[in-house]
């Protein structure tokens, strides 16, 4: 499943060069992952209350074209299980031309009751190819 969310750059997210500061792309991808799971009926807060913490183990961001203040963009997200990790592939695309601004690969680990888990049935069921 591929999920999309539309967003807009806010002025305070830009640096002196007038482009989105690199760290904000990670915020965009995190928000998109949370929204994807919410749209699938699962919230991070509910997972935490059940003793399941979904944490970023590694993130790779490749910057392609800068976003600027007031640019609208979409974040396309798809996730799948690879080994014991859950991997999210995300593209941030500027609108209206869908020019690739940033590409992310995010490795997620599940920690269940304080222990790194090799399986998380809730995520396994959601992230089926």
Image (spheres, grey):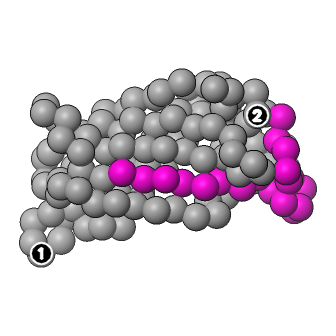
Q: Tell me the quarter of the image containing the N terminus.
A: top right
10 Å crowding of disc 2: few (<14), some (14-19), many (20+):
few
Can see residue 24?
A: no
- Give the left or right position of residue 119, taking residue 109 as reference: right
Q: Tell me the quarter of the image containing the C terminus.
A: top right
Q: Where on the picture, by quarter, is residue 41?
A: top right
Q: Residue furthest left?
A: 17
- Give the left or right position of residue 6, taking residue 79 as reference: left
- Give the left or right position of residue 68, taking residue 115 as reference: left
Q: Where on the picture, by quarter, is residue 27?
A: bottom left
Q: Which residues are magenta?
A: 103-121
Which residue is identified by label 2?
124
Q: Where on the picture, by quarter, is residue 66?
A: bottom left
Q: Which residue is more in the foreground, 74 or 87?
A: 87
Q: Residue furthest front?
A: 83
- SS assignment at label 1: loop
Which residue is identified by label 1?
16
- Identify which residue is drawn at 66% across, 31% down: 127
- Identify which residue is drawn at 82% across, 41% down: 120
Does the magenta-highlighted stretch encompass residue 115? yes
- SS assignment at label 2: helix
How far across and down, in percent of the image, does residue 38 sit? 58, 31
How far across and down, in percent of the image, does residue 52 sit? 80, 49
């Amino acid at each position: 499943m591929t999920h999309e969310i539309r967003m807009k750059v806010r002025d305070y997210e830009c640096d002196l060069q007038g482009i989105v500061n690199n760290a904000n792309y990670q915020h965009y991808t995190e928000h998109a992952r949370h929204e994807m799971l919410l749209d699938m009926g699962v919230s991070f807060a509910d997972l935490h209350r059940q003793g399941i913490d979904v944490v970023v183990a590694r993130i790779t961001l490749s910057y392609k074209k800068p976003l600027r203040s007031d640019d609208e963009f979409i974040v396309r997200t798809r996730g799948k299980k690879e080994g014991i990790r859950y991997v999210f592939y995300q593209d941030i695309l500027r609108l209206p031309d869908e020019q690739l601004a940033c590409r992310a690969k995010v490795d997620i680990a599940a920690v269940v009751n304080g222990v790194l888990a090799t399986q998380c049935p809730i995520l396994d069921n959601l992230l089926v190819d």
